[in-house]
Amino acid sequence: MIDQLSPVERILDRLEGYKERRGELRARCPAHQGNSEDSLSIKEGDDGRALLACHAGCDLHNIVAALGLGVVDLFAHNSSNGSSVKKATKKSRSSSPRSDEKTLSTADLPDGTYWEFTSPVGEVLYMQRHKGAYYQRVGDDLWAKGLDGVTHVIYNLPELIDGIRAGKTVYHFEGPKDVETAREKLGIVAATSGGTTSWRPEFRGFYMGADVVIVPDNDEPGRKYAEGVARDLLEVARSVKTVNLPGLGEAEDLTDWLDAGHTKEEFFSVVEAAKPYRLEDEEPWPDPEVLEVKLPPVDDLDPSLIPDPLRGWVFDTSERMDNAPPDFAAAAAVVVAAALLGRKVGIRPKRHDDWTVIPNVWGGLVGPPSSMKTPALERL
């Protein structure tokens, strides 16, 4: 069965043919179907994922779609039980970390609830203290504060990948706490990118072909977060719903809703009644307003500012174009003349220094429509 194949084998199974070249596999890219038999490179990553690169520049999403797969199929997944469960864990410390320490052991981390973010195969990459700092893994039991240089991932990623592959509806929340509440009390496939500023457009690749339900917190940041996620997922998911739970107080979330006595059956009833998300449902843009322009009048061009060799031509050109502003012809002529000089003339602004500046003259014509800007340029 295809689910027993590795990600690379899964790709090769969908190709018409392939060959080995310089330590990697090559095939004809299914997205653009060019003449080259080795336009697509296929390699296996360190974590078992399939790495695809089209040398003609085809987008990854178009490549996997042409193979009848999703981006999630490029990742390895745990085969022991079909899911990788993440639970919040309480960390204790034996002593307070010193302020100058860059690396902490697990025992030295501040007390609190921590959420583990893993690779598709379940390897812990970093974790977040609930409503607090992030710590990246730098050793078996060593952590560094911050995520510099670490690839950000979706929380509960292995289960998300397996759930989409199995055709299950997946639920996206704001924060790991609600993900764990949903998994425990609702028995659903749940994921999150983290807080309201954590979503990245590249995360949408994990949701290719999925049915997604987004459940935001009941506040303005939560609604904006959900809207941004929904807008991105609409490009790749099979369906997207945004569900606002009834009866939530300001800034409350799914956990608060269930703790208030709402039931699992009520939750699914609300999800069922929700309409699919559409861009038209977003708050419309306001009608454009006419801006009152209050700019000072432009001074008339002083002929003495134009070099003698150009002065006659500029005003003659202006008159011949039904008295178009001479400024247009003057600006164009000066810029062209400067281009002819090129690097032949330099300026040394400092008396006792060999620092040389080559002047570059840039020009632009600004004026209302039909004020003869283009004809003035065409005279050169």
Image (cartoon, rainbow, N blue to C red):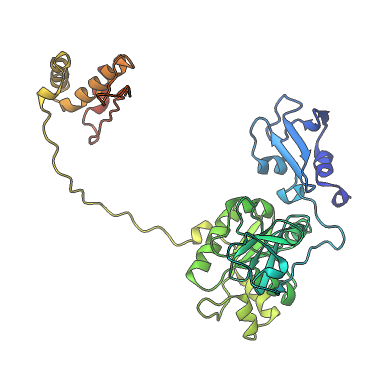
Looking at the image, how many numbered discs can be counted on the residues? 0
Position of residue 54 relative to residue 239, above or below, is above
Asked whether 337 or 96 is in front, the reply is: 96
Q: Position of residue 359 (x, y in %)?
A: 30, 24
Q: Quadrant of the C terminus?
A: top left
Task: In the rendered view, tell whether residue 3 sits above or below residue 330.
Answer: below
Figure quadrant of residue 105: bottom right
In front of the other: 147 or 199: 147
Left or right of 199: which side holds 94?
Answer: right
| Residue 152 on image: x %, y % | 64, 54
Question: Of all residues shown, which one is farthest toward the front?
Answer: 352
* Res. 178 in view: no
| Picture quadrant of residue 243 | bottom right
In the image: residue 81, left or right of residue 368: right
238 left or right of 338? right
Figure quadrant of residue 347: top left
* Observer-nearest of 16 and 148: 148
Name the residue furthest bottom. Answer: 261
Whether residue 111 is visible, yes or no, is: yes
Rendering coords of residue 242 (x, y %): 58, 66
Compared to residue 55, the image places residue 287 above or below, namely: below
**How far across and down, in percent of the image, does residue 81 sit?**
86, 63
User: At 61% from the left edge and 80% from the top edge, which residue is drawn?
Assistant: 257
